[in-house]
Amino acid sequence: MRCGDVLNSEYASFLGVPLTLPGAVAYGTVAALALWPILAGKEGSRERAEADLNSRAPLLTVTTGMATFSAYLMWVLATQVRELCPYCLASASLSFSMAALTWVKQVEPNATKSLVYKAGAVAVTGLFSLGAFAYASARIMVMSQGPGEGGEVGGSRPPPITTHSTARSEALALRLQGLDARMYGAFWCSHCYEQKQSLGQEAYRRIAYIECAPDGFASESKTCKARKIPGYPTWEIKGELYPGEKSLDQLEDIVDGKVPVPPPMEIPAK
C-alpha cells in the first residue's frame, strides 16, 4: 500500500546504501548467469556446455542469498515497518521462486557442493541481514532520543530539529497555522525529518504534526488511517491532502492557491 514509506524507512538502507541497489545488482547477476550459456554458443556446442556448468554454482549461490535476504525483509516488513508494500511482496515472491527453481532443478548436481553453496549463501546473507537490522535499529534508537512532538507519553520520538527558521519560513508557518494546516508523518521517515529541518525550530512549533506510526510518540495512527494518508510526509492544507516533502516555494504556492488540488488517491484496504 505504501511502498514509498517502506523505501524511506530506516530499514531500507545499510551504511547509507539503499537496499534497492544490491537488489538490482543481484537481479542483474541472475539474468547474466542465466544468459551466459545461451550466449556462449549454439545448442549442443562444447562452449555452451562449459558455460552452463560454470554458471550453476554462482546461480545457486546468488538465488539462495536473495531468498534468504527476502525472508529477512518480509520479517522486517511485518514486524517493524508494519506496512503493506506490493512491490516488496512481488520481489520476494520472485526471489523465492528463482531459488526454488535452482534447488528443485538441481542446478548443481553434486550433492555435497550444492549443500556447501546453499549453506554458505544462507550464512553470509544471514550475517548481512543481522548487520543491516542492527544498523537500522541503532539509528532509530539514536533518532528517538531527545525532544519530540506530541502530548502523550510512550512510543519512539522523531529526531530533534537542529536548524533555525528564517523570516520567510516563520511567515509561512504563521500562514499555515492560520489555515489550520497539518503535517502527517512518522518518526522514522527521513523525508519528514528533512521537511521539518527546512522549516526550522521556530516555524515548526506552529505546525500541527500528526504522528502516524503506530509505535511512534503520541501516535494518532487511527486518525491517519481514517484520513487515508497516502504517504509520509503529507500536508493537509485547506482540507486537501498534498503528499510528499515540499519546498518553501511549493508550500507558498499551495497556500496562495497556485497549485491545483490533487485528485483523491485510491488506497487499497489492508
Image (spheres, grey):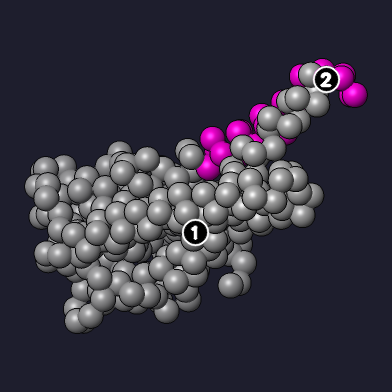
Q: In the depicted view, which residue is nearer to us: 240 or 86?
A: 86
Q: Is residue 140 visible?
A: yes
Residue type marked 1: Leu
Horizontal side of 203 relative to 92 (left or right) equals left
Q: Secondary structure at mark 1?
A: helix
Residue type marked 2: Arg
Q: In the depicted view, which residue is nearer to us: 76 or 157?
A: 76
Label 1 close to label 2 by CB (< 8 Å)? no
Magenta-highlighted residues: 23-46
Q: Residues within 10 Å of mark 2 (few under 14, many from 20)?
A: few
Residue position marked by numbered label 1 in the rendering: 73
Q: In the depicted view, which residue is nearer to us: 97 or 119?
A: 119
Residue at the image point whose x is 45% and y is 49% from the top? 124
| Residue 44 location, quadrant | top right
Residue at the image point whose x is 47% and y is 38% from the top? 21
Mark in front: 1 vs 2: 2
Q: Which mark is residue 204?
A: none
| Residue 183 location, quadrant | bottom left
Tell me the chief SS of the magenta region.
helix
Q: Secondary structure at mark 2?
A: helix
Residue position marked by numbered label 2 in the rendering: 46
Q: Is residue 146 found inside the magenta-colored segment of the image? A: no
